[in-house]
Amino acid sequence: MLGDGELNEGQVWEAAMSAGHYGLSNLIAIVDANGMGLDGTTQDIMNIEPIAAKFEAFGWSTDEIDGHDIAAISDAFHSAQQAARPHAIIARTKKGKGVTFMETSPYWHLGYLGPKDKAMAIREIEGRLG
């Protein structure tokens, strides 16, 4: 399990290159590609796109999915288990999905959900439930 902000670290790509070289078909990497890191957007800090193409360059197979779609996640794991080489699932997600004030702020990468924020989040979620 990797975050997209973590992909700007050299040891990630050293491991990816080794896994591809040695054909580690039992290895599945899941990248939570939410576009945010602790210091801001991944595009502004260090653009790591296109993620799938980078893994493929090291000999991996890949799937890019909506990381909020349970059926897509299940299908991607099935596909990964059939792969004859390491496989990366690029799960496109939105940080704090479903809670408006969390979706757009990098603060929630490590933010503390205090009583006030918790109450606001619960109200928003319950409001969608009808």
Image (spheres, rainbow, N blue to C red):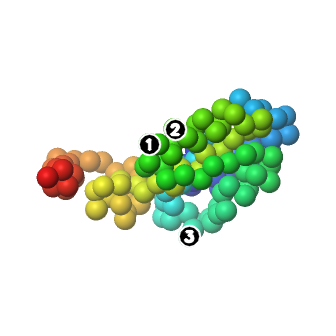
> Would you say 124 lies left or right of 66 here?
left
Q: Quadrant of the N terminus?
A: top right
The local crowd at label 3, few if under 14, some if 14 to 19, many if 20 or more residues have their Cα within 10 Å, is few
Percent x, y for residue 57? 80, 54
Percent x, y for residue 11? 72, 45
The local crowd at label 2, few if under 14, some if 14 to 19, many if 20 or more residues have their Cα within 10 Å, is few
Residue highlighted by disc 1? 70
Please say whether residue 18 is visible from this viewpoint.
no
Is mark 1 in CB contact (under 8 Å) with mark 2? yes
Secondary structure found at label 2 = helix
Name the residue at 54% across, 52% down: 65
> Would you say 27 lies left or right of 99 here?
right
Q: How far apart in space, not on screen, are marks 2 and 3 (Cα)?
A: 32 Å
Percent x, y for residue 63? 63, 49
User: Which numbered disc, 2 or 3, marks the residue that appears first in the sequence?
Assistant: 3
**Most extreme residue toward the top, as rendered?**
26
Please say whether residue 48 is visible from this viewpoint.
yes
Please tell me how many numbered marks the rendered image carries. 3
Name the residue at 67% across, 62% down: 50
User: Which numbered disc, 1 or 3, marks the residue that appears first in the sequence?
Assistant: 3
Nearest-to-viewer mark from 1 and 3:
1
Residue highlighted by disc 3? 44
The local crowd at label 1, few if under 14, some if 14 to 19, many if 20 or more residues have their Cα within 10 Å, is few
Percent x, y for residue 115? 17, 47
**Most extreme residue toward the bottom, as rendered?**
44
Eyeballing the image, is 53 above or below 77?
below
Secondary structure found at label 1 = helix
> Would you say 65 lies left or right of 115 here?
right
Disc ID at residue 74: 2
Name the residue at 57% across, 68% down: 43
Is mark 1 in CB contact (under 8 Å) with mark 3? no
Give the amino acid type for the residue marked by disc 1 in the picture.
Answer: Ile
